[in-house]
């Protein structure tokens, strides 16, 4: 029997309420995959958290595309006049992709993506724990191609034995979040990639950055 779906958006709102009542702004290590996915989630988070961005996206192919997405994110931060620190993890697609190879022919959203989420989020969570962050989370649930049940379950499992760092449950695509992020991308003329990241997600009609 399929597990009942958890309303992670409701849990997110409840968590924000708790934070508001506490009167303290906790630290959040926020995994960000690209500028477009950061836009709308940031508007929801910025008043509640002291945010540090974690950019560990060695799933992106080729390297030029990885840098293009990172540069777009930096340009966006500059354009809205905020100085959010970014922790960048060295790019290493060749190592990252090894675990994904057995699933290369799968469509997006299956075991390959679960593994890809696990690899990036476990690295983010370990960094958050080592550096004493109150929360760790990701913006990836903004995408309608990313399963929020899987993303949040991975995060909650990572946080099970953590005494300090909590997983920030969220489902940013809810309440028209995905559409709002598209509007914001359009408004600021941000580059919006046509594929998720790995070489297996590139459709024939899509050309990655040179
Ligand atoms: S399609 Fe995206 S989430 Fe899935 S494995 Fe490739 S890069 Fe990772």
Image (cartoon, rainbow, N blue to C red):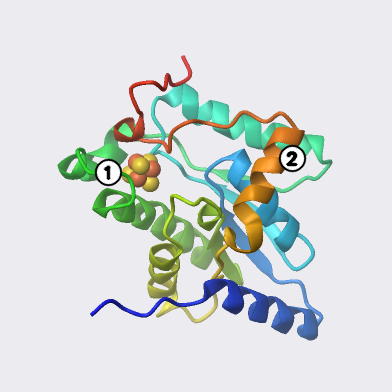
Q: Is mark 1 on a helix, strand or loop?
A: loop
Q: Nearer the viewer, residue 87 or 3?
A: 3
Is residue 157 toward the left or the right of residue 140 in the image? left
Residue 199's place in the image compared with 2, above or below, is above
Task: Name the side, left or right, on which 190 lies relative to 58.
Answer: right
Q: Which mark is residue 107?
A: 1
Circle 2 sits in a helix, a strand or a loop, which is it? helix
Please name the residue that numbered disc 2 is placed on. 77
Q: Earlier in the sequence, mark 1 or mark 2?
A: 2
**Residue 83: percent from the left, percent from the top?**
78, 45
User: Which residue is more in the foreground, 155 or 129?
Assistant: 155
- Find ligand 1 in the image and state its quadrant: top left
Image coordinates for residue 176, horizontal then vertical, percent: 64, 57
> Image point 35% across, 53% down: which residue?
119
Task: Residue 148: give x, y in percent of width and height.
Answer: 46, 63
Disc 1 and disc 2: Cα gap in Å? 33 Å
């Amino acid at each position: 029997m399929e597990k009942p779906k958890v309303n992670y958006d409701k849990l997110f709102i409840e968590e924000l309420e708790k934070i508001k009542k506490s009167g303290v702004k906790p630290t959040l290590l926020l995994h960000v995959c690209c500028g477009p996915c950061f836009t709308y989630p940031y508007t929801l988070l910025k008043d509640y958290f002291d945010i540090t961005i974690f950019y560990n996206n060695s799933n992106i192919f080729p390297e030029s595309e990885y840098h293009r997405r990172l540069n777009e994110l930096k340009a966006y931060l500059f354009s809205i006049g905020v100085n959010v620190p970014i922790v960048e993890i060295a790019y290493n697609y060749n190592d990252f992709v090894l675990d994904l190879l057995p699933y290369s022919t799968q469509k997006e959203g299956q075991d390959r993506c679960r593994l890809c989420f696990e690899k990036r989020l476990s690295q983010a969570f370990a960094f958050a724990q080592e550096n004493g962050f109150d929360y760790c989370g990701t913006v990836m649930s903004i995408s309608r191609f990313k399963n929020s049940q899987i993303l949040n379950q991975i995060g909650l499992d990572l946080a099970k034995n953590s005494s300090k760092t909590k997983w920030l449950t969220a489902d940013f695509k809810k309440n028209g979040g995905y559409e709002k992020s598209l509007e914001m991308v359009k408004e600021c003329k941000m580059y919006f990639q046509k594929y998720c990241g790995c070489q297996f997600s590139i459709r024939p009609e899509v050309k990655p950055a040179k």
